[in-house]
Image: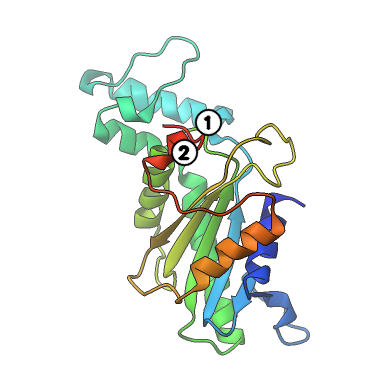
Amino acid sequence: MDQHELITTVLCEAGGRHAEDSLPAGYAGKRADVVFASDNLIAEVKSFTSDRRQDPQVATKLGEVMERNAAFGGPIVFGTVNVRLHDLPKPIAEQALRVVGARVRKEVTSARGQITATRAVLDMPDAYGLIVFVSPPERLGNQTIAWLINDALKQSAHMDGLDGAMVIETPLGFPAGEFKSRNTFSSLWSISGRTFPNGLAERIAAAWECITPQPARHADAEDFVALGGTE
């Protein structure tokens, strides 16, 4: 079971249903992953299993960001080096985030289209649109992933129809197994300002406990490090 299948299984355990099981026979258009009919919510899951920083094209673009901003506090890099975005001046960090987050922005636009199409074919015009991002435990740090997702959502050209985002960083379902002993961190983000369906977050947490070996507990941002997350 990969990470995408894991999350869709948890969502179905929480009261959802695979969208394809609700679609009319012969429908071949775009579709989201999971439909919560009783909660009037449609969810699309996007999985990220690769480390964008290891992509040579991304590394080159990040190097260009540093080079053209050297006079404004950007580091002068010789060879290969890890640079924490937290340590960069904010304008430079934002440019670097947008390089790393290019794929996230594409997935936001894709999810919006899938959710919109599913609303139409299932006649759920006012369904809450939820995009769920799932990845291995974040290599960039929890604060950085927060900036990355927030920036990607703000910069996306097509936000209409997306009401919320759930970000799940989990070692479970990751094929390589290198994060096996790590904890899972999840957060819920508002996009449109609509209220998340009452009780659904708690049902998802209960489903997580049922499907996985990890107990679900509430964690504040300052708890991440104590629970094994990165700063």
Instruction: Inspect this view and state whether residue 75 appears.
Output: yes
* Image side of residue 68 versus residue 141, left or right: left
Residue 179: x, y in percent? 65, 34
| Residue depicted at x 63% and y 67% | 11
Element under disc 2? helix
| Residue found 50% across the figure and 67% down from its top | 201
Name the residue carrying label 1. Answer: 53
* Residue at figure coordinates x 57%, y 78% from the top left: 117
Q: Residue furthest bottom?
A: 123
Residue under circle 2?
100
Residue type, mark 1 in image: Arg
Left or right: where does residue 103 sit relative to residue 78? Answer: right
Numbered label tally: 2
Residue 173: mark: none
Q: Is 97 on the left or on the right of 199, as rendered? A: left
Labels 2 and 1 touching (C-beta < 8 A): yes
Q: Position of residue 156 (x, y in %)?
A: 40, 57
Which residue is at the front of the view, 77 or 170? 170
Up the image or down, 168 lies above or below 138; here it is below
State which quadrant residue 9 falls in: bottom right
Mark toward the start of the polypeptide (2 vs 1): 1
Colour scheme of the rendered structure = rainbow
Image vertical order of residue 2 relative to residue 138, above or below:
below
Q: Residues within 10 Å of mark 1 (few under 14, many from 20)?
A: some
